[in-house]
Structure formats: C-alpha cells, structure tokens
C-alpha cells in the first residue's frame, strides 16, 4: 500500500475517494490472504487478520504528520507560505467551491478531536 499512499499528504479528496481507496485495499487484502467473497468476512475482521488499518485512516495520519512537519518550519519556507498563504481570487465560478487542502486538514483535525 506504500505505492498507493505516495504523496497522499498533499491530496484534497472527497469521502467517495476515501471509500474507493478502502475498497481497493480490501480487495488487495482479500487476494493476498486468499479470501473469497463466499467466505463472508467483515471488513474489520479482514483488517484484524492482516493487522492493518483502513487506507483512508492511514492517509489521514500521513496528512497530520505532514502538517505537524510544516508547522515546525520557519515562516519563510515555501511549504509553509503555500499552506497558509491566501491566493488572490478572481471571478468565482457558480456553485459550491471545491474542497481544498485546508478544508481537508480542518476535517481531519475535527475527526481526531484536536484543534
């Protein structure tokens, strides 16, 4: 799963994307463990058997680890400027704005119970 997670700390993805990643991981675990669909093993049982966690949760941990790393940087470093800088806004498109990295980080922090 290392290849799948590569660069994931910079992704801004939706819940549906997380679900697809978890489905992919469970399919791979089933193949590796030799489990067929007829075996009817729950998702949590599959993760326990392998000793792993859902891929979406692992990506959230990576994002949090990366955020802490960027917070420790000096203020003049480019990653910190890009993460906390405010881009100039042009004309806004109609509809709901897409979620950005900052929105995903706030959601992760809320889910982990930290601020």
Image (tube, helix red, strand yellow):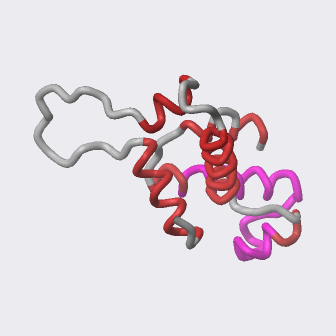
Q: Nearer the viewer, residue 102 or 17?
A: 102
Q: Which of 28 and 57 is in front in this view?
A: 57
Where residue 9 sits in the image (x, y, percent)? 61, 41
Q: Residue at x 15, y 45 (%)?
A: 95
Q: Which residue is drawn at 46% across and 29% down?
A: 82
Residue 6, located in which quarter of the rendered image? top right
Q: Quadrant of the N terminus?
A: top right
Task: Tell me if residue 25 is in the magenta stretch.
Answer: yes
Residue 10, located in which quarter of the rendered image? top right
Where residue 104 sits in the image (x, y, percent)? 46, 51
Task: Tell me if residue 52 is in the magenta stretch.
Answer: no
Q: Which residue is drawn at 70% across and 71% down?
A: 43
Where residue 17 sits in the image (x, y, percent)? 49, 49
Q: What stretch is highlighted in magenta?
A: 19-47
Where residue 80 sits in the image (x, y, percent)? 53, 33
Q: Which of 91 and 98 is in front in this view?
A: 91
């Amino acid at each position: 799963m290392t290849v799948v997670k590569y660069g994931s700390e910079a992704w801004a993805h939706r819940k549906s994307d997380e679900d697809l990643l978890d489905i992919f991981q469970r399919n791979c675990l089933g193949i590796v463990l030799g489990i067929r669909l007829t075996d009817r093993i729950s998702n949590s049982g599959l993760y326990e058997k392998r000793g792993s966690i859902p891929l979406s949760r692992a990506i959230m941990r990576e994002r949090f680890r990366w955020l802490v790393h960027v917070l420790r940087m000096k203020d003049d470093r480019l990653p910190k400027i890009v993460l906390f800088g405010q881009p100039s806004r042009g004309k806004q498109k109609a509809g709901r704005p897409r979620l950005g990295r900052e929105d995903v980080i706030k959601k992760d922090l809320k889910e982990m119970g930290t601020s």
